[in-house]
Amino acid sequence: MPSTLTAQPTAPAMDAHVVKTYARMPEVFVDGCGAHVRTADGRVFLDFLGGIAVSALGHAHAGLVDALRDQVGKLIHTSNLYRHPYTEEVATRLARLTGLEAMFFSNSGAEANECALKLARKWQRLQGHPERTNFVALEGGFHGRTMGALSVTHSPKYREAFEPLVPCCGWVPPNDVAALQKALETIRPAAFIMEPIQGEAGVRDLSLDYIRAARELCTRTGTLLIHDEVQAGCGRTGTFLAGAQAGVTPDVATLAKPIAGGLPMGVCAVAQPYVHVLQPGDHGTTFGGGPLVLRGALVFLQELEERGLMRAVVERGAQLQQGLRNLQREYPEIIELRGRGLIQGVRLSKGAEELQKALYANGLLTNRTGGDTIRLLPPFVVTEKDVADALAIFAHSLKQVLRT
Ligand SMILES: Cc1ncc(COP(=O)(O)O)c(C=O)c1O
């Protein structure tokens, strides 16, 4: 852990003038190192949430810190009206990693999805189908909080207070090919948007057969296929895109979360036929793709491509999964283990809320999704010892909650 602590604000003062969109924990985090974070009063947590799938390089990654320090001293922002040295290099790397052709750089996952939805509507218009304005999305899907992304997000708890949203969405249950076929044929949407692994719905895997069938149905019905890879993408499952494990390339993939090492960045990556759909003036962003964030993205992509970080994801993911399987044998209350690589979910028949609180009290940061599932999103730099420590905390917390 770094030895110097920075400023120590107190929790009540921090929240007095903050809009109450989050029920924050009282601890005040001030610094971190690798998979660990430390509070102002010196408590150390093992961070298996990674700022919700963001901190893939861990905290205070030396290469990232050096690059960002250097970049801050050179050039932070230029706007998209001018060129800077990192745009083409990051876009070229992403094209290689995704198999897609061109990138729009945004500031978040929701904005990447906005770009994808707009592109789909304009594509249909250019094809002579201006009436194809609707979207089809999956039950349980989460795509962000902006009006368009929220319109294709399923849970009423996120949507209801803000309706009417973009009017349009047909919902289909995950892994049901017949329902998808019917929706695509009757609704004739502009696009079908899906997460290959539904993170917010409790790390729910879509079957590889379903991902393949969806590709085939979208092609057959002239529907754009958008894979939202904001949470499961960027190498978290052991392949750069989670959908690649089904051998599928979407028409559009959206990325965000870990892609710039913790700086805010999203990407809307489009396949070759759609590269010219959005023209100057159709879409834009003041901050997106600036030199500072793209320098961060370059470090992240170099770590993945040149330093074997995706191999580490597979190895540490297997270790974590094996450890959780061992616990499942002891605790039948663990009814399902979900996910791949370093996105994993532990679904419980009872006690999920209490377990998550116990994990926190015992020094392991996780969260709970889908009501009954503990979600684990450790950094890609997590060590063998970190995983062993997390499993030990898990075992101890399970015992506290379910056996005492
Ligand atoms: C699958 C998915 N899509 C989109 C988003 C929205 O991303 P952001 O919060 O960066 O706007 C999230 C955020 O959790 C997500 O998990």
Image (cartoon, rainbow, N blue to C red):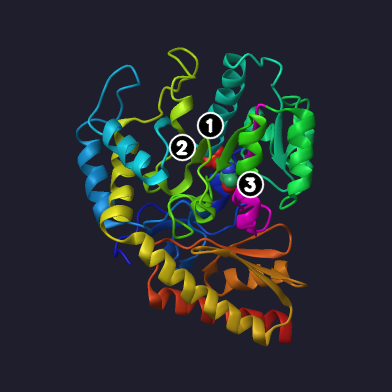
- Identified by mark 3, the residue type is Tyr
Q: Nearer the viewer, residue 200 or 223?
A: 223
What segment carries the magenta color? Answer: 190-213
What element does badge 3 sit on? Answer: loop
Q: Secondary structure at mark 1?
A: helix
Pick the quarter of the image with the N terminus. Answer: bottom left
Mark closer to the observer (3, 1):
1
- Taking the spot 40% from the left edge, 61% from the top edge, the residue there is 380
Residue holding disc 3: 22
Where residue 226 sits: x, y (%)?
58, 37
Residue 293 location in percent, x, y? 34, 37
Q: Which residue is mark 1?
A: 111
Residue 266 — which label?
Answer: 2
- In the rendered structure, are the residues bearing label 3 and label 1 in contact, judged by CB atoms less than 8 Å apart? no
Along the horizontal axis of the image, is 140 left or right of 66?
right
- Which residue, as the protein is rendered here, is positioned at the far front? 220
Q: Which mark is drawn over residue 257?
A: none
Q: Earlier in the sequence, mark 2 or mark 1?
A: 1
* 208 sits to left or right of 245: right
Q: Are marks 2 and 1 in contact (CB under 8 Å)?
A: yes
Q: Amino acid at mark 1?
A: Glu
Specify few, some or many for label 2: CA neighbours under 10 Å numbering under 14, 14-19, or 20 or more.
many
Tell me if the residue at label 1 has its CB under 8 Å from ligand 1: yes
